């Protein structure tokens, strides 16, 4: 019997120029990460949009190189592209002052004072966007009571027994609901090419 084939992840699929749907999904997930990251560095909406478009173009051209870099997380690779593009953008506009008299280069330099903090902001925004996208995709698959049991216990950290009492579910049923939703979220996030990370949500007992 032939071994079952693994479905290609979204990141693998965007290498195919004929797969337009894959690219649309990719932009839907990852463009907001880049946009908000750019804004966190002090840039205005128009500049953040320009950077997002430039990063998307660079990703499209460089995917083959990413696939050849064994052991490199896509998140870290995308961060480096976004950061480089942001720095390039700042240099191009370094003589153009903002309303408060500061140049774009000055604004970016201010945002680079702590590299570790900057990367942490990127990671937080990245995880937040991945999780929001996955929940929007997965939530319609469950009835409202099951989803509420999952959300209140796994995301909000509420006690399973008290949530079950309010929803007319046993403690065991709440755990089953949470487990089912978590499994689907894990599958959805994996399908996007990212690794599931438990710290995205709160652990609850």
Image: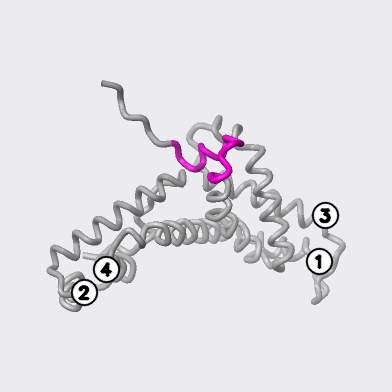
Mark 2, residue position:
163
Mark 3, residue position:
92
- N-terminal of the pair, mark 2 or mark 4, is 4
- Rate crowding at label 4 as few (under 14), some (14 to 19) or many (20 or more) other CA atoms within 10 Å: many
Mark 4, residue position:
153
Q: Secondary structure at mark 2?
A: helix
- N-terminal of the pair, mark 1 or mark 3, is 3
C-alpha gap between disc 1 and disc 3: 11 Å
Q: Secondary structure at mark 3?
A: helix
The outermost residue toward the right is 95
- Near-viewer residue (31 or 105): 31
Mark 1, residue position:
103
* For the residues bearing labels 2 and 4, Cβ distance under 8 angstroms: yes
C-alpha gap between disc 1 and disc 2: 52 Å
Q: Secondary structure at mark 4?
A: helix
- Near-viewer residue (120 or 192): 192
* For the residues bearing labels 1 and 3, Cβ distance under 8 angstroms: no
Is residue 52 shown above or below 160?
Answer: above
- N-terminal of the pair, mark 1 or mark 2, is 1
Is residue 142 shown above or below 190?
Answer: below
- Near-viewer residue (198 or 8): 8
């Amino acid at each position: 019997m032939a071994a079952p084939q693994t479905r290609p992840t979204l990141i693998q699929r965007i290498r195919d120029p004929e797969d337009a749907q894959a690219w649309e999904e990719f932009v839907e997930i990852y463009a907001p990460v880049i946009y908000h990251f750019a804004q966190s560095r002090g840039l205005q909406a128009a500049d953040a949009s320009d950077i997002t478009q430039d990063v998307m173009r660079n990703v499209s051209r460089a995917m083959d190189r990413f696939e050849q870099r064994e052991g490199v997380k896509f998140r870290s690779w995308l961060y480096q592209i976004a950061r480089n593009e942001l720095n390039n953008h700042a240099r191009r506009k370094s003589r153009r002052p903002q309303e408060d008299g500061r140049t774009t280069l000055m604004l970016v330099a201010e945002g680079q004072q702590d590299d570790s903090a900057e990367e942490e902001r990127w990671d937080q925004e990245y995880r937040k966007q991945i999780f929001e996208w996955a929940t929007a995709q997965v939530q319609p698959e469950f009835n409202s009571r099951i989803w509420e049991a999952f959300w209140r216990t796994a995301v909000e950290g509420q006690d399973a027994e008290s949530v079950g009492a309010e929803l007319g579910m046993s403690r065991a049923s709440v755990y089953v609901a949470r487990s089912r939703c978590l499994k689907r979220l894990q599958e959805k996030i994996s399908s996007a090419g990212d690794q599931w990370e438990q710290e995205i949500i709160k652990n609850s007992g």
